[in-house]
Image (cartoon, helix red, strand yellow):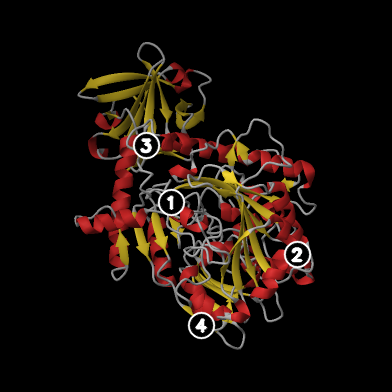
Amino acid sequence: MTAKHITLEALGEERGTYLSHKLDRLELQRKLLGEEEVFSLEYLGGDQVALACLGCEKGKYLSHADGSLSLQKGRPGETELWTKHDQGAGNVAFECVGYNRGLYLSHAFGYIWLQNGYQGEGELWTMHPSTSNYTAYLTAYYDKATACVQELRAELSGVSILTAQHDDPAQQLAYFVGSQVFNTRLQQNPLAIVYCENADHVSIAYRIAIKHEIPIRVRAGGHDHEGESSGTNVVTIDVSKINHISVDPSTLIAKIGAGNRFVCLTTKLADENVMIAHGTCATVCITGFTLGGGWGPWTREKGMNCEYLKGATIMLGNGEVIDVDEGANGEVPDLLWALRGGGGLSYGIVTELRIEAFPLPDELIKFELHWNHYDEREEYPQGDFPTLAILRAWESVIQAENTSKLIGTNLKINARPAVESFDYTTITHGCCMYGYWKGDKASLEAFVNEHFAKLEPVWGIDGTGGTGSSAKEQYTAASGLMSNWDRESFAKVNAKLSGLPQGAPIPPDEDDPAPHKITSRFVNQEGLGQDGYKQLLLSLTSPLVQPENRSLGIFTYVTLGAIVGDYYRSPKGKNAQSAFPYKDKLYTIQYQAWWNESDKNHQYPAPSQSSEVYTNTNLAMDWIDTARNFNIPNTSGAFISFKDISIPTRVYFDKSYEKLKAIKIEHSKDPYNHLRTRKTII
């Protein structure tokens, strides 16, 4: 049996109408709108054919029985068969076979019926062959896309809109630059990038996109590690220009536009002598950070930033812009609860956050402690300090109840190549502890001497607490207190530890876009235990990590981000009304693989396919895939801010998942689920 895709056009007075089928109905339709008008001509021997619907009615056949026409599932008998009479020039008549032989598929005056005998050309049809509907689909999409861009430009004439559909080379270049997200491993090509400047712009851009059936994405800083803040053939609604900031001095509520990046936001807040529980990467935007939870250097003392979200302005799935705020007596509406760590986009497009700030302390020091340095070739960690001893000391510190001045901390452990004889009690890895210390230099030195003196760390300090500049001055200085706690840029590596004087500031890491891949999990409340330690360190001692990686600008490591501390041990933290589901965990484990593009020792793209950069990068990504499923006792879950598309969505939201789905359905006003990506709640 062979098949041929056709459309049937009526002749005579009905020329220009087509035999259509949709939702169990047959009708004559004035224009071709899609593949529901297309049939498959299935030959069943001789001149006998079956007319099978395609598209949404695939599997149904044009049937005839007792003088009536219908769409019928399957072919139980010959009532679905026809004899095709070719009248020449592509004109055909279809005669029923079987009991209804002699009746013909007829059309006139907008109706379709079975008619006895030829009464005129009204019973004839013209067959338009169509070997594939894909061309028609692409044509229809092009028409919709063109109309969408034209309407965006007409309705948002004062707004910057970038698209590849532009004759000006400078504008085309701006489009391709604007298309790049933070993870340069991913490259998308949006239909249009709309740089909205207020909530009305967002609503207009959104309504136009869905009117023309074009998917939307929302981007602020573009730091979604899986690139879901943009896409190909979508309208990317960019909110980076919605960057207003104001602080109410009586309530300390900060009104923050959705496009604010920490590098500017923290400075402006410090000018007002306040701060929020910000993140560690200067180029991250406040919105995605908060909606994902909001881990950072204040987490031990203040908790996740989402716990301080008091209100938001949000555009819902019907284009309506509303305010949702905490009640006067602390009542938390469901939609606000969902925005507190329930992930981005699912419930609407946020254009403003209202976050409760806190007064800046007088003293604040950002510090780093380093162990097991790499040699000048960046190949092997030098030192005699077992990673297990460093990890245990760090764990002890974050779980202690007398370490309140350590308001937040991260421990980075570099992965290394496999060794012949692995012993988790003696294996060494390059390690760095990052921390924020709310106190003076003397108290920090006493803390380090008490907990880490036997491990002899190399120090690095930003800020001098009570002996020099204040916390406000540190945040507002040119170098500031903002830098990435965990990423290494190859250009900085040698400067960091080569001849660094005791106590000298360590140069900040860069936050430039770069290709990378990550995954994550949490350590449970009971801690890793001996088996957990062994498996974690085994995952970091891998044949997938090559000795020359660091010299090529390829970095593989984990960062352990402390959650446990004063806030989540307190009644306020334990009873916090937020969707963030992992308040009871000790810390995050974030596996990371980065490779730099601009260093002189690393050409990208590489000059040949045999380049060890390509080979080693693929192995580094394999290491991430292996780590995702590595058996590490006493770990669970995953952190949506460290997005890995291979982790099931339910895992990210855990015990909040079912409630978040219900809130999405009830409150987002998005019945057609326009507000979606691969990792939205549904």
Residue 237 location, x and y as percent?
A: 41, 61
Question: Which residue is at a point 64% across and 72% down the rendered structure image?
Answer: 308
Give the number of the disc on residue 37: 3
Q: Which mark is residue 514?
A: 1
Q: For the residues marked 3 and 1, what is the alpha-carbon distance in whole angstroms?
A: 47 Å
Q: Is residue 522 above or below residue 281?
A: above
Could you tell me if residue 467 is visible in this image?
Answer: yes
| Residue at mark 4 | 271
Mark 4: amino acid: Asp
Q: Which residue is mark 2?
A: 450
Residue 568 in the image, given as x and y percentages of width and height:
74, 66
Q: Earlier in the sequence, mark 4 or mark 2?
A: 4
Q: Which quarter of the image is occupied by the N terminus?
A: top left
Q: Which of the two marks, 3 or 1, is nearer to us in this view?
A: 1
Q: Secondary structure at mark 1?
A: loop
Crowd around label 2: few <14 · some 14–19 · many ≥20 (10 Å): few
